Image (cartoon, rainbow, N blue to C red):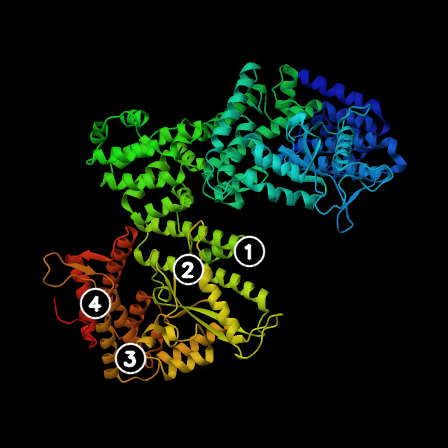
Amino acid sequence: MNSSEAPLPVSDTVAMSVERALQRLHASSPEAQAALADATVRMRLSKLACASDFAIATLCRQPTLLARLAADAQAPASAMPALDAENRGEWESLLRRHRAAESTRLIWRDVLGFDDVDATLAGTTRLAEDCLQAALAALEAEFAGRHGVFRGDDGQPRRLIVFGLGKLGGGELNFSSDVDLVYGYDLDGVVDPLASDGARPLAAEAYFARLGQQLARLIDEVTADGFCHRVDLRLRPYGGAGRVAWSFTAMEQYFQHEGRDWERYAWQKARPVAGDIEAGERFLVALRPFIYRRYLDFGALDGLRTMKAAIAAEVARKDMADDIKRGPGGIREIEFLIQSLQLIRGGREPELRGRALLPSLQALVDARQVEPDAAVTLAAAYRFLRRLENRLQMLGDAQVHALPGDPVARERIAIALDFPDWHALRVELERQRAIVSVEFGALLAPRRAVSSPGALALYWHALPDAGSTDILADAGFDEAGEADTLLRDLARSPAVSGLSDRARARLDRVLPALLQGAARAGHPMLALRRLLALLHNILRRSAYLALLDEQPAALARLVEVVSQSALLAERLARYPLLLDELLDARVSGPLPDRCELKEACAAVPGGDDAEIVLQALNEVRQTLGFRIAMAFRDSRQDAGDSARQLAWLADGVVARVLELAWHEVASAHGEVPAARFVVLGYGSLGGEELGFGSDLDLVFLYDADPMTPSSGVRPLEASRWFARLAQKIVALLGVVTAAGRLYEVDVRLRPDGAKGLLVSSLASYSDYQRERAWTWEHQALVRARVVAGDDGLGGDFERVRGEILARPRDPAALSADVLHMRRRMRAELDRSDAATSDFRMFDLKQGEGGLVDLEFLLQALVLRHGLQHPALLAPRHTPGLIDAACREGVLDADTATSLHAAHAHLLEAGLSCTLDRRARRIPRDEALDRAREAIRRAARSQGLDFGFASD
């Protein structure tokens, strides 16, 4: 026996209520008598009668519906009745009877367990949409006959757009909810918005306002058949005092200048539900910057606190503790919790802009902003509360959210929800509400300082006219006088004096905590200078002050990062958007792999608009580079992994810039038929060993007849077309945006260097490498790889590269060339201190036994043994080359192990220097000497003594 056929365990009072309802139904029609004669159907109708007086009353009035339910327990939806000129006098009745029938069908499916609460909410939403769409279409046809329409340049009528807000917009309308509507219209491209084209023309504002008013009356008014849906138009601009229908232009101006916090929450769920759906979606895209800020918007929490306080006051004033929507731990707290996290992060993360609550909650879990266990309990609480809310409303089709006082109604609701009695339901309700209250309270917890900076707060509040430097000295600032001067200058600055009261209050809370953190740093004055540089850049950006004010963890992490890394401090100061990363869970989680980095760059918005693409691409590069730097700084990954990720990130950037540059050149000059193009990465980029802030060594190749013209109205020969493309790539990579520039580019490694053409055909490149290239250029080819462009041409390049590297060479001549070039480079570039210096600093890159010595050693091995050992030709990065040489027997295992350790140590030291904006020179110590000796010993064993003399 399934749940729909099990008898109800009811008290005598409830049993009598159910029996009376069935008697009324039995007396209503022959169809009811036939249905009740079937024991299974009678059992189902008993469950229905326990849950809903409204459903039984509807079945009494619509016996054909009862017959349909009895014949098919699954009860599929029925079609919306036609509304046309022929039945104009019946529109109200048809809509109301359809809504009553479909609502009763939804109760039937819900009570008998055919639908879960998600399906019931979705069904209720669809019903409201169907009624709105049918009613609007009928009224539009009537209006067109009387007043005409407004037409765009394309000749198509411009329709009213009905936006559904709240639960209608979210697709989760409760059973007897009103529908929150806002009317809009788009007259862009309309020749005359002052008059429609009918016999009795109207201006647009009057036309669409009257149409909207008639729609609300047709849906909302109570007739002998009841109502269809209650309509609430108060969420429009200026509420009840505002015009009924708004043009898109007027609404955009309103939200730009006068939009309030609560309207951001309301429009977050907005969705066009009737009329011109496509135009409505376009408007919502335009409205997105009002709803979602580009940065982490912790300022939204202040608005939420205000809204919550107002609701709490209303609940207390009206004794609404039993209100499961607005009361403590109620539905609204779950909605506020999810929507607030969406508003905070949705500007940066499009996947968090969902309208429906439960999918949005899952998106927050996927973005690591909500713990999975918390999400499971919240989702369960939400479904429980929404199911209970629906049953409260299903009882009598009333828009209620409070628990009933009537004992019989209480027991009916409890039993219909499969609880033994009201007490058991109430216990479960309080358990679920407690869960919600805890999660919601955590979101709006009072601000907590890192620890109480009382004396420093008093000092700051006394500036600029008073305040004692002794407080700074006691806090830990050795140079208290200098610190005092810096802080007084800040207090007097126009940036501080011009702050709003709210922003100034935030600064007064944040600055003492920053001072306390700086005082505890290893170098307090260094940390203070860096923090003040950052503050100067964010004072006018209230969202960043709000972030530090609301999130003590972010403030503490900021002090830590700024104190320990000059590079990160500088980037945070120049690009405050990176402050968001201090709180992003992904900063401390797993880093994206090669494919994810490339996809992140490929997915930047803007299409082919260079300005938008470059800004977005710079932001992506900054944020991902910051995550990589933080992972290295926190020792969550080693230098080798960090350097490879930086190179993969550059690959993604170059690929997206190539796409953009290609579009721009093709737009101006057409395309070269059947042409192919690749970007090669040399040096650190090619070797997947990029540093923080490294430039890119790029070489460009194409494959086409150089004289073939492009197809545009201003054609160029292929050679010039691809030269223009390469120039465009270099220029775009170097464009300065608000988020910085992408990369400096070095193109001197191309054939013939600075004297050569910027771009080479594959044929000319191949000829050059075979006939004219120097040995050092073949060494550079060891690390060269395709980073972007045509796969087929990339394969052709790999064949050329393989042929060149595997050429037979005289070992003695090769060693002489490699040694000559290395010694020449050291003479010009090595910044190590002389061997006679008492405190010797070693150049990690160019010093003897440094990174370049290791690169030259491995390159020489590839050129010497590549013909006999083709496996040496595949790797580009240093660890891969060492492993290949060991597998092929070119290096013994002990040497390979020591070279791996030496490379890891030198690379780690080099990245650490870069992270603190220091030259890549470090003091000599035992670990460094061990690494250098491993490289020198390996080089000498291969006949390559790179030193001038032993030190």
From mark 2 to mark 1, how far is it between C-alphas?
20 Å
Badge 1 is on which residue? 609
Q: What residue type is disc 4 on? A: Ile
Front-most of 591 and 664? 664
Quadrant for the N terminus, please: top right
The residue nearer to you, when weighing 267 against 13, is 267
Question: Where is residue 783 shown, x and y percent of the image?
Answer: 35, 70
Residue 602 in sight:
yes
Q: Where is residue 754 in the image (x, y as percent from the top left)?
A: 37, 72
Q: Which of marks 2 and 1 is nearer the N terminus?
A: 1
Residues at marks 2 and 4, CA–CA distance in whole angstroms: 29 Å
Residue 675 higher or lower than 496, as above or below:
below
Q: Position of residue 795 (x, y in %)?
A: 47, 74
**Mark 3 belongs to which amino acid?**
Arg
Label 4 crowding class (10 Å Cα cut-off): few <14, some 14-19, many 20+?
many
**Which x, y percent locates residue 399?**
67, 24
Q: Mark 4 points at which residue?
A: 935
CA gap, disc 4 and disc 1: 49 Å
Residues at discs 3 and 1 in contact (Cβ within 8 Å): no
Label 1 sits on a secondary structure element that is loop
Number of disc labels: 4
Element carrying mark 4: helix
Task: Left or right? Give the position of 779 relative to 415.
Answer: left
Front: mark 3 or 2: 2
Going by the numbered disc 2, the residue's amino acid type is Ala
